[in-house]
Amino acid sequence: MTDVSRDTPLSDDEQLAEDLAGFYADPLGYVMYMWPWDTEASIQLVELTPEYYERFPGAKCVNPDCPSKDHDHAHGPDKWACEFLDQLGEDIKERNFDGTHAVRPIQNSTSSGHGIGKTVLVGMLIKFISDTRPFSRGIVTANTADQLRTKTWAELGKWHRLSLTSHWFTYTSGRNAMSLYHNDFKEEWRCDAQTCREENSEAFAGLHAANSTAYYIFDEASAVPNSIFEVREGGTTDGEPMTFDFGNPTRNSGRFFDNCKGRFKADYRVRCIDSRDVQITNKERIDRWIASYGEDSDFVKVRVKGEFPSVGSMQFIGTDDVDRAMEREPTVDRYAPLIIGVDVARFGDDDTVIYPRIGNDARSFPIERYKGLDTIQVSGKVIECIRRFRAIGMDPSAVFVDGGGIGAGVVDYLRHLGYDIIEVQFGGGATDKDVYRFKSDEMWGTMREAIVTKLVLPKLTSQGGVELKDQLTQREFGYTIQGNKVHLESKKDMKERLGGEAASPDIADALALTYAQEVAPLRIVAGERTAGKLITSEFDPLDGKY
């Protein structure tokens, strides 16, 4: 037998393994050791707060191109993530797993606002467990297959490639083969990504690591079916089991809610992260949301504060906001564009509505409403409206027409006659796909922002004022289970909920259509666009008579 002196130098991998053994119960120390925070620009997004910089002075930034190079600092996880990792270390020490006797599961449930960097922490957690716990086995899931593949698992790939242990493991990201496994122990030491479809629940069963750590990570946990949560319980009975759930708290029911606020809360370390307290979030956008929806609105609770929505009504546009918009007085803006929205009736009890808006003024020109018109007749009414405005020197900057159902015929006919019409599909994709489900949801959201801040609505005492107020304030909204996006209730659901003679929100939809796209201000003053001269007319836009 060869006598090997303890002074024999360790190989690089042996030294790396020895270092990692020292981080078994120190997740934050592991994170600061594993990645090149001092030089790698792609991960230098957050400055460590002073208390953490003092703990890791060796991580001082030396990147000459760093925007913060004018003062001593270090980069690393955001404060909330540092606290999370330190608390995880405390739980590991408290359990004191000896490699044989099973310990109580370490379970975490974190609700948060939008954009705090959850997937970054998910990637770090997978790497921490894989690198410090031989023969650990994990499963990761998210609310949709695309979220799982393009965000959650892709983020792991980034951190894996930059890690000191990238050569120890193989990372795959195919649609049906998303895995991270040890090169020498492919089956026994790995983490896999699985979709969370209810019919796929059995894929979450049988995850055991009696001499190591079995772990589950649920991203966007509000949308994970209860059955998946129930099945994973079987994997928390031996070894040093861990579970980590993250998500926007979009639902007041379900297992994620129960873990954070309900009957299972005592079994979890529960956190609530406010987006405003995180360095990387877009504060300007958050301020805009708060101004538009209100500090105490369910929208802000869910997407900013990380709080679950109220049990009560999910009214989309506040009554007080509509009242204020009806009390405002219009101001003269000579460069304001004229925009016309046309909501085409689909059913016998619905109205076709033509709604003109000039800048922030949705009051000064009459709203036109018609019943029982066919596509040719509706087209004729739109042409009449355009001609009346042209007669007083005002050419519409945009005419947005609802192109769903029979509205498609209106769009085609008007275009055939040479009119520049912009077709809008209420069920089409939103521009801001992170927030809204469909185009209709987004148009109403943009209209809501205008109502809160600057839009002038018809007086409550005007013809149709009460009806418009009802249509704007009676519509409720919720969040999609997959994607946590705002979605308005359908006209059909609204009618069923309100019962009686509840009207379809045709006037409100026509006004919302004027917000389908942003329209630039005029470059020539309204009224000076015909041969450079102002055209005079006896037409009084306020009397409703033509």
Image (cartoon, helix red, strand yellow):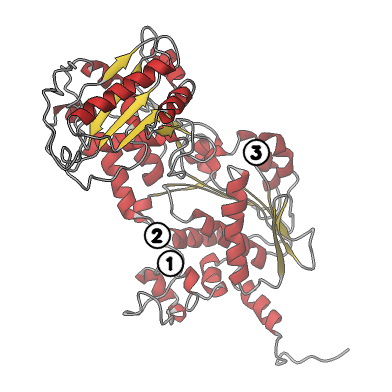
Residue 148: mark: none
Name the secondary structure under disc 2: loop
The answer to whether the residues at label 1 and label 2 have Cβ atoms under 8 Å apart is yes
Q: Quadrant of residue 305?
A: top left
Residue type at mark 2 is Ile
Residue holding disc 1: 45
Q: Earlier in the sequence, mark 1 or mark 2?
A: 1
- Marker count (numbered): 3
387 or 227: nearer the eye? 387
Of the image marks 2 and 3, the number of the one nearer the N terminus: 3
Q: Which residue is mark 2?
A: 280
Disc 1/disc 2 C-alpha distance (Å): 7 Å
Q: Is 482 rendered above or below residue 346?
A: below
The residue at 49%/70% (across/down) is 42
Residue at x 19% of width, y 46% of height: 524
Q: As rendered, which of 99 and 318 lies closer to the eye?
A: 318
What residue is disc 3 on?
Answer: 228
Q: Position of residue 542 (x, y in %)?
A: 14, 22
At label 1, the amino acid type is Leu
